[in-house]
Image (spheres, coloured by chain):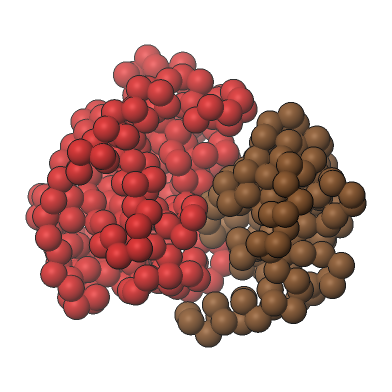
Chain colours: A brown, B red
Amino acid sequence: MSFPDDLIYSSEHTWVRLDGDIATVGITDYAQDKLDEILSVELFPVDSSVEQGEPFGVIESVKVMTELISPVSGDIISINEDLADDVVGILNSDSYDTGWMIAVELRDLGELDNLLDAETYVDYIEANEEAD
Amino acid sequence: MIPFKRFGPFENMAIDEALFRTHQKEGDPPVLRFYGWERPSVSLGYFQDAEEEIDCAYCRGKGINIVRRPTGGKAVLHGGDLAYSVIGRENAPPFSSDVVETYRIISGCIIRGLARSGIEVQIVEDGRGGSGSTEGFCFATSYKNELLAGGKKICGSAQVRARGVFLQHGSVLIDLDPLAVCAAIGKAGDAARVREIEAAVTSVREVIEGDINIGTLSRDIAAGFEEVLDIRLVEEGLSPEEEALKDRLLEDKYMRDEWNMKGWRAGRGY
């Protein structure tokens, strides 16, 4: 599993790539692995507003359906329309690049302090695995 | 535990979602609920397309209500089944943050309960089966940790997770009517599809070659949970908060065609 150092992560297993005040968001390699074969994704539409810790969509895999929890607050300025055509092929193979989900214009950059760097995120998922 | 009772399909889904949404505080005890259906109904998985999966005109003509579940998975024809739901925190014992492990734990309880009623079932150990034109129908496929009797599916389940809480609900098939299933999925009179379902799916009545009381079966499964998890279930009804949310969900979501027929495609607001 890979966890690129240039991304920041949430305990809800999403990643954030920052470009100024625009955050691109997706799910981590750990999340796609845990979900197993992903079947469908529903994302909130462009122009809707999301809050840190609140849903921005839902995702269904062969195992489970689960809410996607936003790592940031702001307005969605674009969503990855390619996921509607080939979610199965994209998310399980490349969750960090072609598998991006939403781009958000951030409302509060200070909220990023609540997120984790790659090393801390890896420690977090290892601790979770041990707890199970 | 909320003991067995029959409701309409819309109310059944509203109750399950209300239990799921209100189960937020750490320390809230897990909930086990049993229910039946006041009339034949079809439930669709969250992402399923009603027009694609179901013969909606046939269902309307027969008075079969169509309801969309808050969980994923495939279509189920209800009426001849005992439904259950389990709501709990994913990290709180006896459950697990691992989805498959939680399925396995709940399956173990149901297996023990069904054995009390003389029904021997096994867990699906690997992969998914099922093919052909009935694949949009839940019981035509079996996923890891679902339950088979004599190699045929007898219990199917689905799970949704949000904010550390899970809802798993499913159905133990008591009666199987392959002709009715085929008609509901738009394959009326298709003999090959009927055979396909008969080969893949069984029911409690077929296994025990006799009749069974659905209330007794639900109590046996409840006892299975008590034995396997070494717990004592306490019977309760919905709390006022759960009841109020159930009423709201019923009116704003589950009784609405926008949700049941189009779901998320109709836009948000659910």
Q: Is residue B79 left or right of residue A29?
A: left
For residue B51, say whether it is visible. Answer: yes
Task: Indicate the quadrant where residue B233 lies.
Answer: bottom left
Residue at 18 percent across and 50 percent down: it is B2
The foreground one among B222 and B136 is: B222
Q: Please provide percent x and percent y for residue A128.
A: 54, 77
Residue at 74 percent across and 79 percent down: it is A119
- Residue positioned most to the right: A19
The foreground one among A107 and B30 is: A107
The foreground one among B210 and B252 is: B252
Q: In the displayed structure, would residue A5 be above or below residue B49? A: below
State the quadrant of the N terminus of chain B.
Answer: bottom left
Residue at 19 percent across and 78 percent down: it is B230
Q: Please provide percent x and percent y for residue B51.
A: 56, 24
For residue B75, say whether it is visible. Answer: no
Q: Please provide percent x and percent y for residue B16.
A: 33, 43
Q: In the displayed structure, would residue B135 be above or below residue B122? A: above
Residue at 70 percent across and 62 percent down: it is A113
Q: Is residue A17 left or right of residue B35?
A: right
Q: Is residue B170 left or right of residue B232?
A: right
